[in-house]
Image: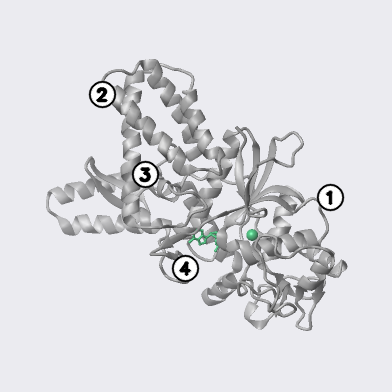
Amino acid sequence: MALNLFNTLSRSIEEFIPLDPAGKKVGMYCCGPTVHDFAHIGNFRTFVFVDLVRRYLEFKGFEVTHVMNITDIEDKIIKRVQANKVPLREFTQKYEDVFIEDLGALNCLPPHRTPRATEHIPEIIALIEKLVARGIAYKANDGSVYFSIDKYQGCGCKYGQLINLNFEGMRAGERVSSDEYEKESIADFALWKARVPEDGEIFWPSPWGEGRPGWHIECSAMSMKWLGPSFDLHLGGEDLMFPHHEDEIAQSEGAGVQPDAKPFVKHWMHGAHLLVEGKKMSKSFGNYFTLRDLLAKGFSGREIRYLLMSSHYREQFNFTLEGLTGARNALARIDECLAKLRGTAAGATAAPDAELLEKISDALDHDLNISGAWGVIFEWVREANRLLAGNQLSAERAAAGLAAWEKINGILGFSTVVEAEIPAALSALLEERQVARKAKDFKRSDAIRDELKAKGWVIEDTPKGARLKKL
Ligand code: AMP
Ligand code: ZN
């Protein structure tokens, strides 16, 4: 069946047809992290959603090129760098590394390219120059370069493609230099920000003087550099729809670089927010958990991934720790059934159960109906358990189920979560702690726990004994 996905641009579910005349290659860009801090699991809900899209496209036979940028220059980063008095790269590299590590813990496939904004300054400048040459961007008295929404609209382009904007009463023609300007304002936005004393040593030369790029132009330049001026799929969280993505369209289409009046992006997808008690999980509200917070509580990347993937990507849902316990139980049910199937299959091989796979893709073809897919999986588990209990499942049928699960798992990404390898010296410390505990030497056992924690590992007491988990 054809793959149908909601397109924010048309506000409707459409068949996904790539621009590639052969219908095979797909260029996909998702806005990556702003590397100024640890990402929270709200952020990761979006990246797990992006991973599901990529995996499902690959399952459908598309050849995906997945690009995710690293926003390593932006208002908040500059403030933090100045406050911490460290060089920009040293500061951002730390959070970039942590982010990539966290993506791995959630078993998200690494993007094919992760361009950094600071390494694309020439492309950014070249794009701004095109906009200036076309009269759509202008240098203001403060030395910054702004995008003129009026001039852009004057060229017959539409500002307000992703959301309907009510232009009446809006502050068109005003200027904003902030990257995250007030929503619903259509003030001209900054493409190039002139150097100010607060920027310290963070600036680049440009035809308009020293300064740095705005956030929105970074994504236009990097996506078009790596995927071409017109590409298939652009993703992000719903908060990026406006102004960030609207501005990306305006800058990219305003530069007039697309051949044959093709759009900058054919298909836009936005993931809904993860909430906490009805409010968006966010750093500014302080209602967040980082991935590491949850790993330290003893949950695994796999369980967190399951929870983040349990609802439809266009539905908001509330995060709770109870939800994670539910995720643990659901995965345990699947794992238990798989273990029994392995026992029954006893090494037999078979082609994947085609009916099961078809039901899964029927659900996912319909705008990634993940609840439908989970319904199919748990129905399959129930039926397999019933047959296994009655000794009514042949080795071949068990093997066919397992082979189908392999494919399903390629889409959902659960079984290959690899626990970090534990260095021998740390295993020895854990052993020593067990001995100390047995001898009721709690001072020593607590000291070992603290030592392990300082090295980035926590002790998890499980029914099968104590084990180490990476923080
Ligand atoms: P940032 O690092 O702030 O640029 O955000 C990275 C990604 O996380 C963006 O795609 C955001 O839309 C997304 N995001 C931020 N908060 C949430 C949330 N509570 N739920 C889902 N996605 C989020
Ligand atoms: Zn972006």
Per the image, the residue denoted by label 4 is: 283
Q: CA distance from mark 2 to mark 1?
A: 62 Å
- Residue at 46% x, 23% y: name it: 353
Callouts 3 and 1 close, C-beta under 8 Å: no
Q: Is the residue at mark 2 in contact range of ligand 1, meaning its CB lies under 8 Å from it?
A: no
Q: Which residue is mark 2?
A: 389
- Give residue 422's mark: 3
Judging from the image, what secondary structure is the residue with disc 4 in? Answer: loop
- Mark toward the viewer: 2 or 3: 2
Q: Is residue 451 left or right of residue 159?
A: left
Amino acid tagged 3: Ile
Q: Nearer the viewer, mark 2 or mark 1?
A: 2
User: Closer to the camera, 42 or 185?
Assistant: 185
SS state under label 1: helix
Question: What x and y, as percent, mark residue 170?
Answer: 68, 77
Q: Which mark is residue 259?
A: 1
- 4 vs 3, front mark: 4
Q: Which of the 4 quarters of the picture holds residue 252?
A: bottom right
Q: Nearer the viewer, residue 117 or 289?
A: 289
Residue 22 percent location from the top left of the image: 74, 33
Amino acid type, mark 4: Lys
Q: Earlier in the sequence, mark 2 or mark 1?
A: 1
Splitting the image into 4 quarters, where does residue 196 fall?
bottom right
Amino acid type at image mark 1: Pro
Mark 4 Cβ and ligand 1 under 8 Å apart: yes
Mark 3 to mark 1 CA distance (whole Å): 53 Å
Find the distance from the CA under tag 4 to the CA under tag 3.
Answer: 32 Å
Residue 242 seen: yes
Label 2 environment density (alpha carbons within 10 Å; few <14, some 14–19, many ≥20): few
- Residue type, mark 2 in image: Ala
| Residue 98 visible in this rendered orientation of the protein | no
Q: Does dot 3 land on a helix, a strand or a loop? A: loop
